[in-house]
Image (tube, coloured by chain):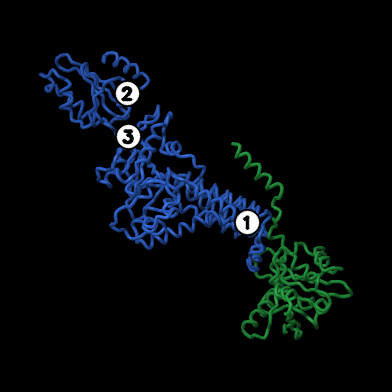
């Protein structure tokens, strides 16, 4: 009987002290598929592409877009990302992120903040591809509508993977590789550049 | 023993027991014989044809002075006992015997009535291809059904009478030489120590002789088919037959026995092995599927791929409850549905299934109370648990399913792994009457495992090697 009481007490305390701390309902999460970061006048501008999850109704096809684009700005990248919560009703959920599009200035000056933000996150997002965009701002790239895929980030992601396997002219840099190449001596990171090639918004690198 | 006192006592009993019939017969030479019968327990034909007919033939008694000799030698009844005291009279009367009392000699003859249902198909353990006869409530019939299949003199039967008010006969059957002696000794001792008022079904005995194991998994099985019991007896197990109960207990029962079915022996071994593997699969699905899904939905969404994430999320948006509540509600509703299905008479069974299908399948989803994927997962899990005919096993599955759901939804995939480990620890620590529960796999007996474990080989003529039943 004593053992049973001890057991009940311990389980009770487990639930009260830690609780279901990591409990998040799947419908409260906004799945981020791509993030674009640029820097102007010492301020960070962030645009985030979030999957638009609606009730699945059986009445025909709905013509609304499958993604929503949010922007936020702030003195640090962290503040900019958190500011997006003033516009979004769902908590940003980064583990499914596919692309990180950076602008030139960030890479040339000091990418310390960006690296910090992504590598210290406890949700796994080191598999995202890093891209650089020179001529167009990341915001413009993320807001183009693409063929085949509903989510533009997935289009870019799939196309990059395919062309690396079949064509061989592309080099994919995941965030993890980027951080590793910065740490190890003797290797420099090689970025892939993304830009819009026509008004239709075709991607070319 | 003085017959007049006995008869007076019996006449006084007759006030409150009107079916006790006492008949006086006057024989020549001033001898009197009393014939006692409890009418509801004996068959009138037998009493009239054999006993009364004999006594009405007065010629037989004309010149004989020795009643004992005439009764014991000339009445045509094969089961004949001599009575020595009053308790025995009542005992034999209640067992359906006809008691003949006279001054010098008392005897009883068996004239039992057939107030049982016929040997018919079992409703709870249907069989498609094999023999379909199943036990009924008559003690003699059950033993006969087993003896018919094992025509060997080594099939021993020990009878014990238990229960102060019910005086139920318990029969312990085993094959001498195949079953282990320690086991027989232990079982007999335990049954002899039972001190109880009445026994209505074999389940009471099961609870009383079960060892303290702290587990929900069954260590004693109850079966209704004689062919399964015969196979088990030949494999070294002990069968306990209880009067008035169609369930025969089997000791010891191992984990693997819940996955076996008698049908497996009457089909091609390839198919039987395949079905058994599917049953193992169904066991794991039934326990772990809802918990796994809950862990993925509520805590560890990182594991899902993007498409699944969007799919599940768009379904959960419509539901106003958190996923855990939804899962538990659905599971409870399924339990209620199954319970209602088994209790309604067949005349009303159709409406329950329609209600269940419509309400759960269609209306609840359309009303936005549950998401379709949750219905699919819970119904797969419930159907998988129905594969096991043995109800105790289903109860164990139920408990572990709820535990897995609670742990997974609170702690994610780690909670899921913890519940899996707990289940494994529980199963590995059970000992059924001294034999580890996971024989023949842990500890590994190669011959047994290959011959009749999950995989069934073709029947061979090899001798039965039952070392592992000798206990650990």
> Mark 3 or 2, which is nearer the eye?
3
* Picture disc at residue B159: 3
- In the rendered structure, the residue with mark 3 lies on which chain? B
Of mark 3 and mark 2, the one earlier in the sequence is: 2
Q: Drawn colour of chain B? A: blue
Figure colour of chain A: green
The numbered disc on residue B90 is: 2
Image side of residue B37 versus residue A65, left or right:
left
- Residue at mark 1: B414
Looking at the rendered structure, which numbered label has been put on residue B176?
none
C-alpha distance separating marks 2 and 1:
65 Å
The answer to whether the residue labelled 1 contacts the one labelled 3, judged by CB atoms less than 8 Å apart, is: no
Q: Are marks 1 and 3 on the same chain?
A: yes
Identify the residue at horizontal 16%, vertical 20% (top origin): B67
Q: Nearest the camera: B172 or B244?
A: B172
The relative height of residue B308 versus residue B21 in the rendered view (above or below) is: below
Badge 1 marks a residue whose secondary structure is helix
Identified at 30% across, 35% down, the residue is B114
Q: Secondary structure at mark 3?
A: strand
Circle 2 SS class:
helix
Residue at the right extreme? Answer: A41
Q: Which label lies toward us, 2 or 1?
A: 1
1 or 3: tag closer to the N-terminus:
3
Q: Earlier in the sequence, mark 2 or mark 1?
A: 2
B127 sits to left or right of B64 = right
Q: Relative to residue B363, is residue B229 drawn left or right? A: left
Would you call the spot at circle 3 few (<14 residues within 10 Å), some (14-19), or many (20 or more)?
Answer: some
């Amino acid at each position: 009987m004593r053992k049973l009481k001890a057991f009940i007490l311990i389980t009770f305390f487990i639930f009260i002290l830690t609780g279901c701390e990591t409990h998040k309902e799947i419908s409260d999460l906004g799945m981020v598929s791509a993030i674009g970061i640029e820097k102007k006048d010492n301020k960070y501008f962030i645009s985030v592409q979030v999957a638009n999850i609606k009730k699945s109704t059986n009445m025909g096809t709905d013509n609304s877009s499958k993604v929503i684009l949010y922007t936020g700005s702030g003195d640090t990248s962290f503040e900019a990302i958190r500011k997006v919560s003033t516009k979004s009703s769902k908590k940003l959920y980064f583990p499914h992120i596919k692309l990180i599009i950076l602008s030139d200035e960030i890479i040339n000056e000091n990418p310390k903040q960006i690296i910090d933000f992504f590598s210290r996150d406890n949700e796994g997002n080191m598999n995202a591809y890093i891209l650089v965009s020179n001529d167009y701002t990341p915001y413009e790239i993320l807001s183009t509508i693409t063929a085949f895929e509903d989510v533009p980030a997935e289009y870019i992601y799939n196309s990059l993977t395919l062309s690396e396997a079949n064509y061989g002219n592309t080099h994919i840099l995941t965030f993890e590789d980027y951080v590793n190449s910065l740490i190890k001596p003797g290797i420099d990171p090689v970025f892939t550049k993304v830009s819009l090639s026509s008004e239709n918004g075709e991607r070319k690198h | 023993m003085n017959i007049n006192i006995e008869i007076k006592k019996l006449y006084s009993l007759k006030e409150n027991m009107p079916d006790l019939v006492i008949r006086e017969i006057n024989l020549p030479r001033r001898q009197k014989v009393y014939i006692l019968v409890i009418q509801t327990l004996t068959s009138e034909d037998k009493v009239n044809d054999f006993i009364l007919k004999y006594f009405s033939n007065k010629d037989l008694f004309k010149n004989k002075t020795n009643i004992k000799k005439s009764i014991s030698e000339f009445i045509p009844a094969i089961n004949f006992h001599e009575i020595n005291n009053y308790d025995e009279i009542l005992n034999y009367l209640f067992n359906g015997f006809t008691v003949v009392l006279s001054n010098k000699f008392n005897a009883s003859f068996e004239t039992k009535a057939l107030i049982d249902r016929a040997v018919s198909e079992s409703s709870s353990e249907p069989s498609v291809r094999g023999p379909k006869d199943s036990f009924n409530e008559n003690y003699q019939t059950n033993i006969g059904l087993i003896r018919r299949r094992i025509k060997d003199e080594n099939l021993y039967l020990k009878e014990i009478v238990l229960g102060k008010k019910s005086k139920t006969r318990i029969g312990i059957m085993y094959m001498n030489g195949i079953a282990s002696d320690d086991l027989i000794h232990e079982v007999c001792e335990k049954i002899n120590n039972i001190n109880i008022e009445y026994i209505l079904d074999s389940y009471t005995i099961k609870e009383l002789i079960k060892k303290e194991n702290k587990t929900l998994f069954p260590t004693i099985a109850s079966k209704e088919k004689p062919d399964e019991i015969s196979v088990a007896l030949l494999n070294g197990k002990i069968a306990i037959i209880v009067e008035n109960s169609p369930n025969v207990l089997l000791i010891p029962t191992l984990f693997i026995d819940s996955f076996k079915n008698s049908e497996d022996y009457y089909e091609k071994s390839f198919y039987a092995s395949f079905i058994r593997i599917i049953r193992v699969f169904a066991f794991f699905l039934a326990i772990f599927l809802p918990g796994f899904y809950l862990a993925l939905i509520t805590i560890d969404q990182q594991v899902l791929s993007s498409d699944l994430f969007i799919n599940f999320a768009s379904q959960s948006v419509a539901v106003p409850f958190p996923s855990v509540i939804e899962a538990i509600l659905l599971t409870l509703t399924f339990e209620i549905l199954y319970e209602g299905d088994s209790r309604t008479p067949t005349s009303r069974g159709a409406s329950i299934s329609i209600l269940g299908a419509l309400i759960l399948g269609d209306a609840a989803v359309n009303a936005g109370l549950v998401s379709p994927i949750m219905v699919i997962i819970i119904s797969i899990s419930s159907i998988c648990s129905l594969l096991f005919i043995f109800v105790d096993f289903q109860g164990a599955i139920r408990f572990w399913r709820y535990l897995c759901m609670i742990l997974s939804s609170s702690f994610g995939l780690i909670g899921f792994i913890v519940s899996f480990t707990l289940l494994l620890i529980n199963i590995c620590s059970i000992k059924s009457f001294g034999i580890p529960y996971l024989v023949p796999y842990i500890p590994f007996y190669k011959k047994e495992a290959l011959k009749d474990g999950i995989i069934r080989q073709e029947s061979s003529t090899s001798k039965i090697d039952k070392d592992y039943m000798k206990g650990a």
